[in-house]
Image: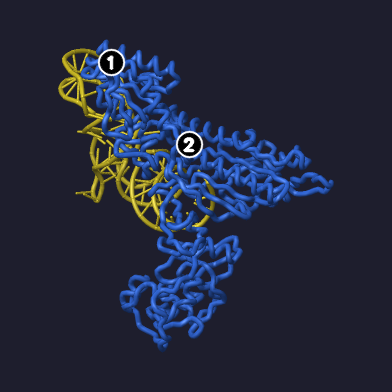
Chain colours: A blue, B yellow
Amino acid sequence: MRASALLFPTLREDPAEAETVSHRLLYRAGMIRKTAGGIYTYLPLGLRVLHKVMQIVREEMDRAGSQEVGLPIIQPSELWMQSGRWAVYGDEMFRLKDRHDRDFCLGPTHEEVITDLVSHEVHSYRELPLLLYQIQNKYRDEIRPRFGLMRAREFIMKDLYSFDVDEAGLEVSYQKMYEAYCRVFDRMGLDYRVVQADVGAIGGAASHEFIVLASTGESKVVFCDGCSYAANVEKSECLPEPRGERAEPAPLEKVHTPGRRTIAEVSEFLGLPAWQTAKTLVYVADGKPLAVMVRGDRELNEIKLKNFLGANELFMADEAWTRELTGAGFGSLGPVGLQLPLYADLEVELMANLAAGANQDDYHYVNLNPGRDFTPAAYVDLREAEAGDLCPSCREGRLAETRGIETGHIFKLGTKYSQAMGATFMDETGQERLMVMGCYGIGVSRTMAAAVEQNNDENGIIWPMAIAPYQVMVVPVNVNNAEQREAAESIYARLQAAGVEVLLDDRDERAGVKFKDADLIGIPLRITIGPKSLAAGKVEVKRRREAEARQVELERVVDVVRELIAADLTP
RNA sequence: CGGGGCGUAGCGCAGCUUGGUAGCGCGUCUGAUUUGGGAUCAGAAGGUCGCAGGUUCAAAUCCUGUCGCCCCGACCA
């Protein structure tokens, strides 16, 4: 491709609307443009990256023994009514009507459609296991689309569904996918972690997330320094460990704490460390209020609470409602005299002489002791894991914390959808049985953004070789110089002939402009053809990631480039 | 939906407080001189000031409504 003919409108300045690195750089590099909130247009360079990601995904899904299908974007409401999700899915689903006033939606996911298909077309254990996938646009009317491609309303996803005769079969399919996903992210050259995840609304038995590490990521994960344990903080189990010496219970005391609301303010005022305080929070689960208590220096994990309660809807009560229920506002809540069901984190049981609110504005109790002064309905694992925690798996190592972007998620679904959609088969004994399903997603467009989020510098994107829009950019310093132009054309032709994806910057621009653009769009290799080296029969070959270029004889250029590409394409 | 911010030329912004000829930088077009890290000079094009009402002799500016966008929170690939 010639840069003179390529549509890649690079920008010198950051677009005002873009906050995150990937959004900014993809925009500036002329790879994406916004068409509406959370809806993007892919320009030629951006689309090439997407295609590369898709191709790697496709190859690995095929290699794992699955088959590609094309499912409809527009889906009839009947299927969703059958699974019960038409009512449950809520505002996140784009809904539309046809001219006959029939209800449809834009597919946010495809469990219904695929299970319906399989229920009609597959009837025997002899046809199982079956793994089907597609790569397609998904539509979710996000409450708040943001971060460019990271959380869009229209996005590209690879979704794969497995159908097995039993749990053991599902286990095999799940394992296959786990490995296929690792190969996908390995091949793309991304630094990622596989972590245990919460199953969320999709439901099912087990789940892993594939997290591309990036400090700007939305997901927080913990991993053990001693064993292979890794989990999303939403999921990670917390083992209770006592902190400090277990003191003898002291007499309960009520203290005036004027204006002290936060844990930091209260602990400073009382002269106690935060871990000797506790915070009490009032929540509403499916309309019923309740209170939860965690150590002052910990964070409540709402997902754990939601799972424990088996609640569909959970939110924190606002201050007015909280006051109505407890008699005090935020900052003075505590377990004593509470007229609500109270659930305390496991750690609370190990605490002694702790401080907490008195359910009276500006008053706290000190020397509270669980069992003596208050008794929760239950002690439950409710807090969010954090760095330094004891590993729940090996019980020896300590957890470290990192952030990342969830680019893949695999679930064991079980029979939830096969039951609802009537996906059954005849087994060897003539018995009709439900298929056991799994579902497996990769956010293709999000992966593109995650790759940028992880690979960039002050000059722009640094694409991993495997997903770069072009592998090499050939830059003659001055196209008006015949010698340089001819050398560039010759190298361009030879590289193309050798099957290298090459972009020739034949624009009549100053060298600086071309270098800036090459860096911004992140082409991994650059061949610079300038007067100095050309006089010696050489050109410069520079890796985007490195500062220094190497001098290469003209006739060796193709070989050197191929070697560099091969070295950067991890198996 | 709650909180915060913003809509003025393709992009980034000023002007609005105190109403009175719509401005700057980048980009674009023409010409010249340039050509190894976003050139210089000369000239030019380009804007219903998001939209709709209202106040006023007069509105980008004041008022009301509305639409859209961005950021923070509850959702998720």
Chain on which label 2 sits = A
Pick the front one: A310 or A332: A310
The disc labelled 1 sits on which kind of residue? Val
- Location of the N terminus of chain A by quadrant is top left
Residue A312: give x, y in percent of width and height. Answer: 60, 60
Chain ID at mark 1 = A
Q: Residue at position x 27%, y 28% from top? A: A549
With respect to residue A390, does A480 lie above or below? above
Q: Residue A153 location, x and y as percent?
A: 51, 42
Residue A434 tag number: none
Residue A533 in which image quadrant: top left
Q: How dense is the environment of label 2, judged by Cα within 10 Å: few (below 14), some, or many (20 and up)?
A: many
Q: Residue at x 46, y 73 (%)?
A: A280
A500, above or below A338, in the image: above
Asked whether, in this view, residue A488 is left or right of residue A358, the answer is left
Image: A247 above or below A430 = below
Secondary element at image label 2: helix
A443 and B73: which is toward the camera: A443
- Residue A124 makes an appearance in the image: yes
Residues marked 1 and 2, same chain: yes
Query: Considering the numbered disc 1 on the image, is that residue within a helix, a strand or a loop?
Result: loop
- Residue at image point 50% right, 47% down: A210
Q: Badge 1 local density, few (<14 within 10 Å), some, or many (20+)?
A: many
Left or right of A515 in this view: A291:
right
| Residue matched to label 2 | A187
**Label 1 sits on residue:** A479
Tag 2: residue type? Arg
